[in-house]
Image (tube, helix red, strand yellow):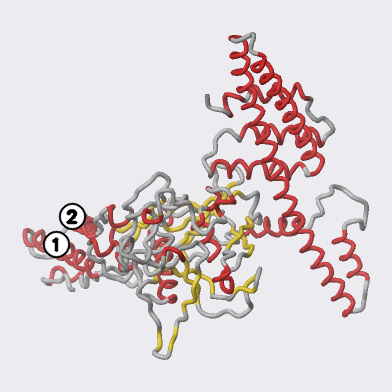
Amino acid sequence: MNCATTESLRVFRPCPLVTPEAPHSSLQMLTIAGAMAALCASIGALLARRSGTAKKLSGSGLRAAWRAAAASLLAGSAMAQTPWPAELVNPAAAAEDVLLPMPCGGTMAFRRVNIPSADALDDRRVQLGSPEPRFSYVENSRSDYVGGGFVDAKSKNQRYYLIGKYEVTRLQFDALSGNCPAANPEGRLPKTGITWAEASYFASRYADWLAKNAAAKLPQEDGMPGFVRLPTEAEWEFAARGGVSVAEAVFEQPAFPMPDGAQRYAWYAGTDSSNNELNGIGLLKPNPLGLHDMLGNAGEFVLDAFRLNKHSRMHGQAGGYVVKGGDYRTALADLRSAARSEYIPIDKNGERRDKATGLRLVVVPGALPSTGRLQSVRTLWTNLTSTGGGTSQALTDPVKEVEALAKATTDPALKARIEGVGTVIKANIQARNEQRDRSAKSELRVAAYLGRKILEDGLKIRAQEMYAKLAPDDKKARAAVDASKENLDATLNYMMETVKQIGLDYPAATMSAQGEILKREFEARSVPGYAPLIDLVVRHGLGARNGKPPTKPELLTELTSLEAKVIKQ
């Protein structure tokens, strides 16, 4: 387009609509074209009212004309960016949804996946897979690890990542194609029939668009914004099972809890569910983390290459790509969180596409987003192999002993062997430290449970005593009070021994860190009342470590003072 319709406007020729640095959709281009035409008309009319020469057009007149055209341009752009209807992008809106913008006035909803963590290298061991013999060759039970990259500034020892609340829809996928799609009900269906490479490229383009247009909307870590990508298999399955919002025994079940029946939570094969066809997002109930359609409807690509299972580990050969969750063709009996199938990208006819395979995204930060994080991780890495035994005399630390031996020898082969032994020792110490942390958390949980039971028994005793006063001749009532008091005293003794043992067995830093992590887990499961009990246990554990364990009257008095906070009447 050329704005110069008269000789007097030569100074404004040409008027480019788009630049390589700021590409626009065709709809936006038409809007901009209209605005630029209005600009030309405004300036042309203004000049016509003058003497016909550019010299007599004052600077203020030019600026006014440009401002008018700019207003028209912005108004047209806003029309092009009309927000999509909520029922197409977040039909089951809920508290704590994280909404990120998209091109064309779009939105994508995410949910937080919390992972209690003490520091950047503190990840969580989880049991994935299934013991089901029929599928053991691909999904036998195995240990894996997940970690949250974003620090929760409001909760101590809490990290998280974001995962898509729904499967990526056709509307969302097409919004990054360069042309703004029509926002209609068809766009609510999951985007399927794509390759793994296209799914990954979509994530890359969306990450680029967010960084350039909505970086302030992204969660940040060490001053760097996060980015979107496909989830790892561990991230996906951890979220599908309910994360820390469910107890470990529930987490390891074949599927997340479905109290209203599977039909209310998943689209599976059959006329009583999917009717063997794809269904729109958000029509059914979510899993415990608020995620919809994790099982059934569309299978979902993850980042990982597919590997067979070799008992407790994955096989060394990497094949195609992993697809998780099953789809609308999956039988109800086969619907499970552990389900994983191989997507081979090529067959004899070339590139493969599956009508029931789509995607879901996560938002994560870089593992080393800043120089400060790099230095922090280096320090944490060194401390991973600390024996945790406090100060000690020279060469009693096996890691330092091996390092000293390696430095002392001049034989390269022997040096390499000694360093190899050192690596094994470091790995064993790290594994032992992780086991110690898990054990500390378990014992803190037991002590907190005991504290709650003491308070519940106290309430029971008061009720029994009231009844006994009303029936002074009832010997059974009096005996029941005495028996309950004996039980309370035994529980109190058990709690005291547990608190003392915690203090003697675990370093102060371990008690404090695992106490905070345990509080985050109770919060995630919406189990109230345990935070003050955990604080009490940690405090007295630290006292016991310093030679000042609590006395029975002290412990009972403190517990009683917490009754109103722990137990809702």
Q: CA distance from mark 2 to mark 1?
A: 9 Å
Residue displayed at 76% across by 55% down: 383
Cβ–Cβ under 8 Å for marks 2 and 1: yes
Q: Give the residue pinned by disc 2.
A: 68
Quarter assignment of residue 171: bottom left
Query: Front-most of 191 and 285?
Result: 285
Q: Name, please, the residue furthest toward the bottom.
A: 348
Q: Give the residue pinned by disc 1.
A: 38
Compare marks 2 and 1 and give the one earlier in the sequence: 1
Q: Is residue 372 visible?
A: no
Residue displayed at 29% across by 61% down: 188
Q: Position of residue 46 (x, y in %)?
A: 10, 59
Residue displayed at 80% across by 67% down: 424
Q: Position of residue 210 (x, y in %)?
A: 40, 61
- Circle 1 Cα neighbour tier, 10 Å, few/some/many (<14 / 14–19 / ≥20): some
Q: Is residue 124 visible?
A: yes
